[in-house]
Image (tube, rainbow, N blue to C red):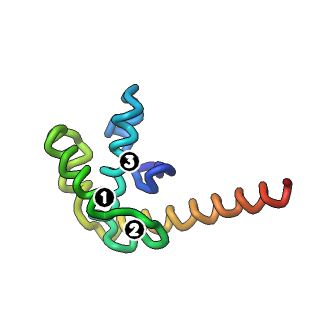
């Protein structure tokens, strides 16, 4: 798993999303990834983030309809898992800390 900053979600290396050269498809899948994170982690995934859960869910359903065989839609990657959820929330907390630290460092340099 690796953290994808723009969507605030995680992807598995074998999913092939970033190997795809279609930027529009990558952009659309950010909503899919975000909804999938909600399915894996639960409501704690979106703490502090203003997003439309209904929009993300509708894009998720649409993508699942058009790409039903994508490995990212396997039940193991779209279902609540307390161990993975714990790991994801810890990683996201560290990433947020790093991002805030970077912003503060740049703010004081200017």
Q: Which residue is mark 2?
A: 45
Please state the total of marks drawn on the protein image: 3
Q: Secondary structure at mark 1?
A: helix
Q: Nearer the viewer, mark 3 or mark 2?
A: 3
Residue at position x 50%, y 63% in the image: 92
Residue 35, label in figure: 1
Residue 102, label in figure: none
Residue at position x 31%, y 71% in the image: 42
Separation of residues labelled 1 and 3 (CA atoms): 9 Å
Q: Label 1 crowding class (10 Å Cα cut-off): few <14, some 14-19, many 20+?
A: many
Q: Secondary structure at mark 2?
A: helix
Q: Label 2 crowding class (10 Å Cα cut-off): few <14, some 14-19, many 20+?
A: many
Residue 66 lies in quadrant:
top left
Residue 81 lies in quadrant:
bottom left
Residue at position x 21%, y 48% in the image: 73
Q: Earlier in the sequence, mark 3 or mark 2?
A: 3
Q: Position of residue 74 (x, y in %)?
A: 19, 49
Left or right of 39 on screen, residue 94 = right
Q: Earlier in the sequence, mark 1 or mark 3?
A: 3
Which residue is outermost to the top?
Answer: 21
Q: Which residue is mark 3?
A: 30
Separation of residues labelled 3 and 2 (CA atoms): 14 Å
Q: Secondary structure at mark 3?
A: helix
Residue at position x 18%, y 51% in the image: 61
Q: Position of residue 38 (x, y in %)?
A: 32, 64
Q: Nearer the viewer, residue 102 or 53?
A: 53
Left or right of 16 on screen, residue 60 = left
Can you say which quadrant of the picture contains the C terminus? Answer: bottom right
Q: Nearer the viewer, residue 74 or 50?
A: 50
Q: Position of residue 71 (x, y in %)?
A: 23, 42
Separation of residues labelled 1 and 2 (CA atoms): 9 Å
């Amino acid at each position: 798993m690796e953290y994808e900053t723009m969507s605030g979600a995680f992807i598995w290396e074998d999913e092939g999303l970033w190997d795809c050269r279609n930027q529009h498809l990558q952009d659309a899948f950010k909503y899919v990834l975000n909804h999938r994170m909600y399915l894996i982690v639960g409501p704690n995934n979106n703490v502090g983030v203003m997003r439309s859960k209904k929009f993300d869910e509708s894009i998720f359903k649409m993508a699942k309809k058009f790409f039903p065989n994508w490995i990212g839609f396997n039940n193991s990657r779209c279902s609540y898992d307390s161990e993975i959820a714990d790991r994801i929330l810890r990683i996201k907390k560290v990433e947020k800390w790093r991002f805030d630290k970077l912003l503060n460092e740049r703010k004081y340099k200017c």
